[in-house]
Amino acid sequence: MSVPFLDLAQQHAALNEEIHQALSAVIAHGCFINGPETAAFERDFAQACSAEHCIGVANGTDALHIALRASGVGPGHEVIIPAMSFAATAEAVVLAGATPVFADCLPDSHTLAPRQAEAAITPRTRAMIPVHLYGHPADIATLSDLAAAHRLALIQDCAQAHGATLGSRPLASFGGIQCYSFYPGKVLGALGDAGAVVTNDPELARWMRMFANHGRQGKYDHLFSGTNSRLDSIQAAVLGLKLRNLPQWLEGRRRVAAQYARFLAKLPGLELPVLPLEDHALHLYVVLHPRRDALKDHLQKHGIGCGVHYPTCLPDLPAFSPYGGGDFPNARRLQERCLSLPIYPEMTEGQVQEVARAVTDFVTSQDAR
Ligand SMILES: *Cc1c(COP(=O)(O)O)cnc(C)c1O
């Protein structure tokens, strides 16, 4: 039995009729940009995040860029980000004209380490972007205090954290701007690129809505030079109906994670994710092993899809090496050892067992040494 890394076809098959109805409705009314579906999704997603405002944008990278611009970040400024994330976190800082400054991640949750972040603050620092990596909430309680003490903007990269909380508190309650991606493979994914910014601050919300829509107030009333980054009505329609399934999908992911934790407990050399299950969005289930590449080959040979998130930490990528330098022992350990196992809500216990059996075979074999 082969187990795919992700099975979007299965998710979409279950929603097939609803999706087609939603798409037909948009085609019929023809309001493809800023249509009623976009307004409805923004309202529903804000509510799902327990936040006041949501503005749909074109993708998660734009969400981060727009949040930085709204926070007044520009040339000459520095923004502290974790050394391990998807490239977009650093890219958005560069897009805004500022300099990314990397800080190491924590050894257990793999999210921005507050002490390292604090040590990276200079008089040029304007903002900090903690990433809720893999769906594990960053230590946002400590980081938001740190941001407040140094008057830094707090921008949360929530691209992997739909449905994550911290101590059951919504991420929005820690302040700043939360940036979401609805890239198809995310926990809540569109049928293409899409994203959103979420905040409780009405001034930031107003500015971001205008910036993402050509800096305008009325149709041709452009108050400042913005950009075109909007959530299409078609994508909003699909996201709106998918959002209703999010609680149940999160539950499914948490079930799979709990099963992995049971089947993979106490295996030699294998580190499992630390799981505050009720807070974790479980976008990815990442294990660590010193012979990651060999384990990955073994799983693939047995028809099990897996991934590496990510093989190179941000300061070591050619794109960001001009900003690199420094010591990031936890991020570098992670890049060498991390392996993402299949996780999606429709996964059966049999499939989880299949993956666990293949992992167990490898880590208890001679090859694992
Ligand atoms: C996916 C992702 C993004 C970027 O989102 P896009 O919609 O692909 O632009 C940003 N940060 C993180 C951590 C991500 O995983």
Image (spheres, rainbow, N blue to C red):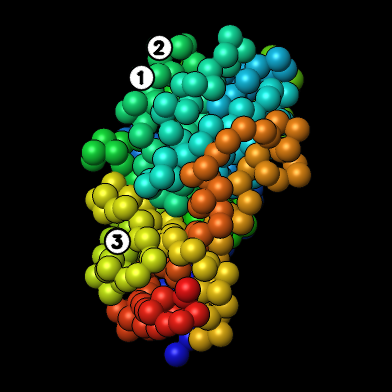
Mark 1: few, some, or many residues within 10 Å (few <14, many ≥20)? some
Q: Residue at x 34, y 26 (%)?
A: 142
Say if disc 2 is inside 8 Å of ligand 1.
Answer: no
Residue 320 picture quarter? top right
Q: Secondary structure at mark 2?
A: helix
**Among numbered discs 3 and 2, the one appearing first in the sequence:** 2
Q: Is residue 150 above or below residue 270?
A: above
Residue 227 picture quarter? top right
Q: Residue at x 70, y 45 (%)?
A: 317
Q: Return the residue at label 3.
A: 254
- Cα separation, mark 3 vs mark 2, equals 35 Å
Mark 2: few, some, or many residues within 10 Å (few <14, many ≥20)? few
Farthest residue, direction bottom: 1
Q: Return the residue at label 1.
A: 145
Question: Mark 3 or mark 2: which is in front?
Answer: 2
Q: Is residue 344 above or below residue 142?
A: below
Picture mark count = 3
Marking on residue 149: 2
Asked if labels 2 and 1 touch by Cβ distance under 8 angstroms, the answer is yes
Residue 224 position in % (x across, y down): 71, 16
